[in-house]
Amino acid sequence: MPNQTRDAGRSARWRALVFLAAAELLSMSLWFSASAVVPALRVEWHLSDAMASWLTVAVQLGFVTGTLFSSLLNLPDIISTRHLFAVSAFAGALANVTLGLYAHGAESAIVLRFLTGMFLAGVYPPGLKIMATWFRERRGMALGVLVGALTLGKASPYLVNAVGSANWRYNVLLISLLAVLGGIIVLFFVDDGPYALPAARFDWKQAARVFSNRGVRLANLGYLGHMWELYGMWTWIPVMIRASLEQRGDQPALAEVGSFVVIGCGALGCVVAGLLADRIGRTIVTSWAMGLSGTCCLVIGFLFGAHPLFLLLIAAIWGASVVADSAQFSSCVTELGDPRYVGTALTIQMCLGFLLTTISIELVPHFVKLVTWRYAFMILAPGPFLGVIAMLRLRGLPEAVKIAQGRR
């Protein structure tokens, strides 16, 4: 009987991982639904570079607003996480549907993208919290799979744009339908796991207490370095690939498929990093990932205008490494922070990280104008290299024994 119970428990947690990963993939496809159709919007709406940039920055600011509100009210810890996820996915899909049906200019689109990002704050952090309730051992792998799934979800609009309708509105509506399916999956097929704690009581001081925990503070500093690079890369590498291929006279569809592959490679990177982190340590894996991605920041520009095979190969390595460490920062927070307020700690971490991304996203196009694509991405390199320093410092702390069952 004990063996049967154990087997049933294993089956339940793997089922939860599959369903939750699918829900994250589908729901987070909303993130770049407008960015993927920017070429069509430039023609139809006469978008400037600044307005095109704001279609992504608005999502980041909306997410920051949503996570700030959620963390101050302890929402992921005091109400049903499943219901928060589902309602947020439905609301995000509604905002995206409105964009697809009624937006006829950048101003209204930016407002709707802000709302989409705000609602996605109720999808990403709660999803990580649910997954943490199912896995104590192999948590790095589980969260790696989850972040890999949402990475693939964020890449999916580029694939939809490449193989879908020539009318961008239909593509945006299709992405909205995917998000609705994601909310339905969580609502009806996902439950909290055996490591879930009872709902916590509201405590407004918890948001500030996150910063008093030395281990969590260093994990957050590593995360900030990672985030400085991540969304600057995700936002602008498709634009760089399009420009490079256009200069060579290659097919535009190749740029869209290439962008999907480059960003989507992050899904594989997340899973591999999660498996390694559970075996050899989170601080080591995050440091290697940031070292590799930081190096890619420095060299990718020299391949602008080169043969697409070489450009896409290095870009794919960058795409795999730039997000590979993401889940491990979250894993560190769940292992080092107060277990009663894990949802709040994760939400604060993301709030700060996504706020920082608004700066790096805005800087890249300015550097393109100043120094061309050849050197523009170098502005992102300090983030991961500073992140390495933070994680190696965390590795030396006594409390680091709590990470990955002592594997640091």
Image (cartoon, rainbow, N blue to C red):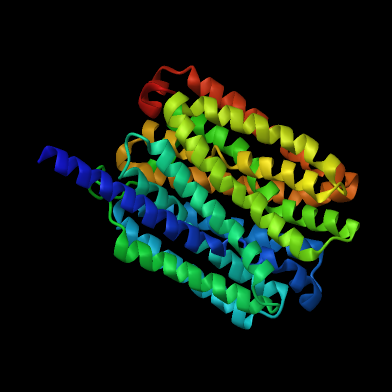
Residue 371's place in the image compared with 83, above or below, is: above
Residue furthest to the bottom in view is: 102
The front one of 99 and 255 is 255
Relative image position of residue 141 (x, y in whole percent):
43, 39
Q: What's the residue at 41%, 22% (across, down)?
A: 407
Residue furthest to the left in view is: 1
Position of residue 128 in the picture relative to residue 93 (left or right): left
Q: Residue 289 is drawn in which quadrant?
A: top right
Number of marks in picture: 0
> Which quadrant of the figure contains the N terminus?
top left
Relative image position of residue 84 (x, y in whole percent):
37, 61
Q: What's the residue at 78%, 35% (across, down)?
A: 298
Q: What's the residue at 42%, 30% (across, down)?
A: 278
Q: What's the residue at 73%, 67% (across, down)?
A: 38
Relative image position of residue 305 (x, y in whole percent):
88, 49
- Residue 248 in view here: yes
Relative image position of residue 59 (x, y in whole percent):
60, 60
Residue 345's place in the image compared with 221, above or below, is: below
Residue 339's place in the image compared with 171, above or below, is: above
Position of residue 207 in the picture relative to residue 32 (left or right): left
- Residue 61 in view here: no
> Which quadrant of the figure contains the C terminus?
top left
